[in-house]
Image (cartoon, helix red, strand yellow):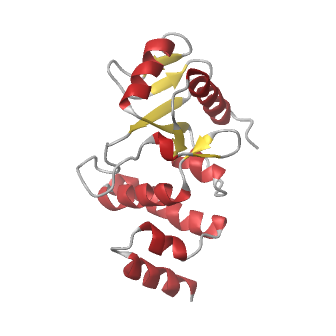
Amino acid sequence: MGTDEVHGAMRRLCQTLEADGIPYAIAGAMALNLWGYRRVTTDVAVLLDAAGLAAFKAKHLGRGYLERFPGSKGVRDTESGVKIDVLLTGDFPGDGLPKEVSFPSPTVAVRGDAVMVLPIRYLVELKLASGLTNPDRLKDLADVQELIRHAALPLELVDDHRPDGAGEVRRDLEQHEA
């Protein structure tokens, strides 16, 4: 219903970023929620570039937000205690090691329910890369499966999304449908 502390922290963060003119995109489980797959989460994942993170910290640390630990990318909303995970443009999902997939610029975001959200094709790509390269992130693979089911994603998304592996993924999806 969007009245919990996590949703409140997300709205406050987005209002703050927008007021400061800092490009951002909501990612992770909150993005899944915005795209139609309702999943419980205890944190907010937000995509920023390095300049946006620096500007945000310079203005808001000690004023509603604290670093989770000294030098951390992540912060905590002091009003609710909700953890904010910052994903940086150019970093790699999952195991953090270099790979074909990296976090895009937040300028790819689209307007969702009053906030900027990561487009679904990027969300799927990042969740797959994360789940396939980090054994502690298998939930990301399940998230993609549930997102496909709940958001009624078209199979064409696979072709537009990753042409190098589309045939394999398409066969897997078609076998799952059968």
Horizontal and vertical percent position of residue 101: 33, 55
- Looking at the image, residue 121 sits to the left or right of residue 130; the answer is right
The residue lying furthest to the bottom in this view is 178
- Considering the image in quadrants, where does the N terminus appear? top right
Question: x, y (%) of residue 69?
Answer: 36, 21
* Residue 125 versus residue 55 in the image, above or below: below
User: Residue drawn 56% across and 38% down?
Assistant: 42
Q: Quadrant of residue 87?
A: top left
Above or below: residue 3 compared with residue 165: above
Please say if 40 is above or below 164: above
Instruction: Point out residue 167 in the picture as x, y percentages from the top left corner.
Output: 39, 82
> Which residue sits at x=37%, y=55%?
130
- The C terminus: image quadrant: bottom right
Q: Is residue 52 left or right of residue 93?
A: right
Quarter of the figure with residue 146:
bottom right
Q: In which quarter of the image is residue 80?
A: top right
Tell whether 172 sits left or right of 1. Answer: left
Query: How many numbered circles does the render carry?
Result: 0
- Judging depth in this view, the residue of 164 and 64 nearest the camera is 164
State the residue lying farthest toward the left: 98
Residue at the location (40% across, 34% down)?
A: 49
Query: Who's the residue at 62% across and 18% down the image?
Result: 79
Q: Between residues 8 and 90, which one lies in front from this camera angle? A: 90
The answer to whether residue 29 is above or below residue 174 is above
Q: Where is residue 84 in the image (x, y as percent from the top left)?
A: 50, 31
